[in-house]
Image (spheres, rainbow, N blue to C red):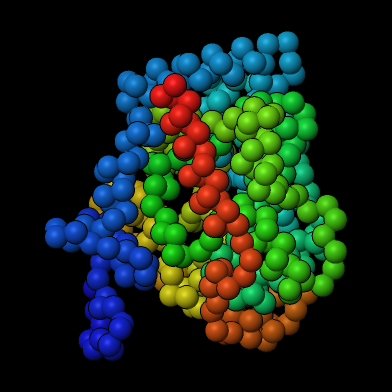
């Protein structure tokens, strides 16, 4: 166990949760008198309202399937599903096929796909029998955005890639009149993610402001979804609904990997989100080196609270190095070449002092006001 030997005034003494493996590298973490962290308590107290790996989930799932099938009557597709080649979306695509749904699979290629991800997507769509639409993000624009984010020295370097994934999927669904978006988001593998480790990738104002300051070319085709579209126009006017069916089944990551490998020729790529070479570099090198954040702690903690692994197993996993020396050298060279900069330039960008998203324009305050107003209106409607 790591422990700070001396603690400077104002500095927090190192501490890890007694139940999961989240620790004081999350600056906002708090512990109760049993030494259990706020993330574990959030899962205990809040997530039960959204996560039903039981009979109730079966019922909700059946209703959801009926609704989607009804919508799809007479149409080429009843829904749309994002496919990254990762475990969650691949397993979901397989289950959706088993449930008799007819989604259009959409893959957003932001330029960082690992070879395995591409092969996995191919295996899944072929064997499940799905039509695949691939949206290729203009690489020069993506590159410019990624470099702008690196120059901003912010924690969440996955903003451009994540925004592109969701914006392209939602824009395509709405444009083609497909109401239901089936998402692999789930509480079984991702219930814990500290907000202090990054910032919302869906804040287009934030993304554009970083690009305005540090970018060098115009963004013309990069998929964007702005505040009003994302929070009002798509859900309220166009009635787009995002469904998370993995929260209605008993979803085990280990069993899902096993199932996909045995039946679909799918292969695992080592860790959560490593289907993207950028995300591997970002999570296993940039974030821990520059900020001291090890995302494995959040991923493993999610699996602990879901009962999938023990705390001891997680601690053993954390003892493993994030990268072997060879892999790191290989990925650094790959990332620098792909971004069109030298290895020294990349290392210099990583070595710059970290900055915080609040130093840049963003829609956080606007979203808070919007959420308060929405809950006020909903309460009024429910009580009238
Ligand atoms: Zn905890």
Outermost residue to the left: 33
Q: Is residue 240 above or below residue 210?
A: above
In this image, 275 relative to 131: left or right?
left
Quarter residue 273 falls in: bottom right
Residue nearest the viewer, comparing 158 with 226? 226
State the residue at coordinates (58%, 23%).
97
Residue nearest the viewer, comparing 375 with 263? 375
Q: Is residue 209 above or below residue 174?
A: below
Q: Is residue 280 visible?
A: no
Give the x, y percent position of residue 377: 50, 33
In this image, 294 relative to 334: left or right?
left
Figure quadrant of the N terminus: bottom left
State the residue at coordinates (72%, 54%).
110
Q: Is residue 142 above or below residue 323?
A: above
Figure quadrant of the C terminus: top left
Residue nearest the viewer, comparing 78 with 196? 196
Q: Is residue 326 above or below residue 193?
A: below
Disc count in the image? 0
State the residue at coordinates (35%, 33%).
49
In this image, 107 relative to 367: left or right?
right
Give the x, y percent position of residue 133: 76, 36
Q: Is residue 361 visible?
A: yes
State the residue at coordinates (64%, 38%).
232
Give the x, y percent position of residue 247: 42, 33
Give the x, y percent position of residue 161: 66, 56
């Amino acid at each position: 166990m790591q422990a700070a030997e001396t603690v400077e005034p104002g500095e927090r003494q190192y501490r890890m949760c007694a139940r999961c493996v989240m620790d004081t590298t999350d600056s906002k973490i708090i512990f109760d008198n049993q030494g259990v962290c706020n993330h574990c308590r959030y899962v205990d107290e809040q997530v039960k309202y959204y996560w039903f790996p039981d009979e109730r989930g079966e019922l909700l799932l059946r209703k959801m399937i009926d609704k989607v099938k009804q919508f799809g009557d007479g149409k080429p597709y009843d829904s749309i599903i994002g496919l990254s080649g990762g475990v969650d979306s691949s397993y979901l695509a397989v289950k959706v096929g088993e449930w008799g749904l007819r989604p259009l699979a959409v893959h957003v290629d932001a330029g960082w796909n690992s070879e395995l991800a591409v092969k996995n997507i191919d295996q899944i769509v072929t064997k499940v029998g799905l039509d695949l639409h691939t949206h290729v993000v203009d690489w020069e624009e993506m590159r410019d955005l990624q470099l702008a984010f690196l120059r901003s020295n912010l924690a969440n370097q996955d903003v451009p890639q994540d925004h592109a994934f969701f914006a392209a999927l939602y824009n395509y669904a709405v444009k083609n009149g497909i109401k239901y978006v089936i998402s692999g988001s789930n509480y079984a593998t991702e219930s814990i993610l500290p907000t202090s480790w990054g910032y919302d990738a869906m804040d287009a104002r934030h993304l554009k402001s970083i690009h305005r300051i540090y970018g060098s070319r115009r963004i013309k085709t990069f998929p964007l979804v702005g505040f009003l579209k994302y929070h009002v126009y798509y859900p309220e006017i166009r009635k787009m609904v995002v469904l998370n069916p993995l929260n209605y089944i008993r979803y085990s990551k280990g069993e899902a990997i096993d199932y996909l490998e045995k039946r679909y020729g799918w292969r695992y790529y080592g860790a959560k989100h490593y289907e993207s070479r950028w995300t591997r570099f970002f999570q296993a090198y940039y974030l821990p080196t520059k900020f001291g954040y090890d995302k494995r702690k959040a991923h493993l903690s999610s699996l602990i609270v879901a009962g999938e692994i023990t705390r001891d197993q997680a601690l053993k996993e954390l003892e493993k190095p994030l990268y072997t020396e060879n892999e790191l050298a290989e990925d650094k060279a790959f990332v620098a070449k792909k971004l069109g900069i030298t290895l020294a330039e990349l290392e210099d960008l990583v070595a710059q002092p970290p900055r915080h998203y609040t130093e840049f324009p963003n829609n956080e305050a606007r979203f808070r006001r919007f959420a308060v107003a929405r809950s006020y209106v909903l309460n009024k409607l429910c009580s009238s």
